[in-house]
Amino acid sequence: MLDSLEELGRLAHTAGVEVVGSDHQRLNSPNSATYVGSGKVEEIKLLRAELEFDMLIFDDELSAAQLRNLEKALEIKILDRTALILDIFAMHARTKEGALQVELAQYAYRLPRLTRQWTHLSRQGVGGVGLRGPGETQLEVDRREIGRRMSQLRRELERVRQQRGLQRLRRRRSGLPVAAIVGYTNAGKSTLLNQLSGADVLVEDMLFATLDPTTRRVDLPSGKEILFTDTVGFIQKLPTQLVAAFQATLEGIREADVIVHVIDVTDRNLWQKVEAVEEVLAEIGAADKPTVIALNKIDLIDPSPEHSAREGRFCMRRDVTLELRERYGDVVEISAQQGVGVDELLNVIEGVLVREMVDVDLVLPYGAGDLLGLWHNESVVAHEEYSEAGIRVQGKLPKWVEEVIAGRV
């Protein structure tokens, strides 16, 4: 819990909030009215008088009733973790697509939390059949307007999703495999993409520094090319509204040929963050993708066995590597900042792509010379035979090449 509070403090800092203190309470279950117990509410009042803060942020998602009751009892602005994360996303959405996704997520969060603060505006119908009696409350009008705006946003994002689908299809036809870089926010994903490709993706020591996906072409050791895509970082308790709104962006992960999961080896909460990433991958349908672990920031680990053993860090890193290797198989220790291990990472990724190839035996029409060229360039041809029906080719293909050829034959 305390580690989660520490992360909440970092989120608040990212949002430009000065943190003056934190507190927690152990309960069997949250209080339905105020989330914390009534005694804790009184303690918070005393803390407010002492620390003079004007905002209180809860490390969980609060219901509309809890928000309303807490604001009434404490007479200050109340935010929950979800609202804070949504605010950070709104700050960092730099493209139209990102802004649309964040706006939809915000409305999905706010709609069930609209309060009846405008019910005094309920108007009486004046004259005419069907106009007598109470009119609509402002609350009902707001709900309807938000519903309309959400429908409009979903339509616009569906167009974005279709455009992204066409972009991915064009990339497939260009004959390039795709690797999706995923990881907990601030694990070093953007730094890795910059190191691999010489890109200039924004890198800052803050949570969710980048939201919009970036794709770069990279040469593999064999001379073949691959596309690396970096997208939004994950986090514990990632709001479901965001996962739903970012489906157009996250589809790129689901359709990638290999996932590169970047993990910060220096993080004492490493395993909790690995699980958080795995939960999101499962939620978007990408849990079964072949995965390579990039164990990042090894340059921050003291290599001296004497010093590290005394600190307990050297053994920790070895144990982490072994356990991750048992779980995933493909683990590479890297420093994205220094470029250490990046060549090995590319070798392992290429090996995974070859390992994932499937056996194929089919006949290509003579007019499909480009497909035969794609097979020769990106795959393994074991046998090639010319006949009246066409060119019979036997060999191994990456799944993405098989999909391209199957769509044309």
Image: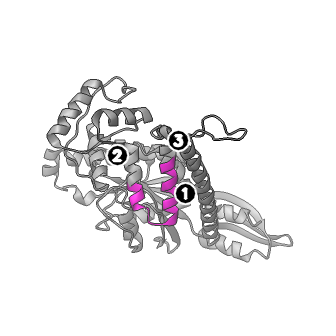
**How far is the residue under mark 2 from the one under mark 1?**
22 Å
Seen in the picture, residue 390 relative to 353 is either above or below; the reply is below
| Tag 1–tag 3 contact (CB < 8 Å) | no
In the image shown, does 105 or 50 lie closer to the viewer? 50
- Label drawn at residue 355: 1
Type of the residue with mark 3? Leu
| Tag 2–tag 3 contact (CB < 8 Å) | no
Q: Is residue 282 left or right of residue 66?
A: right
* Quadrant in which the C terminus is drawn: bottom right
Type of the residue with mark 2? Leu
Residue 136 position within the rendered picture, expressed as x and y whole percent measured from the top left: 59, 40
Residue 340 position within the rendered picture, expressed as x and y whole percent measured from the top left: 31, 65
Residue 179 visible in rendering: no
Seen in the picture, residue 172 relative to 255 is either above or below; the reply is below
Name the magenta segment's main secondary structure.
helix
Q: Is residue 149 magenta?
A: no
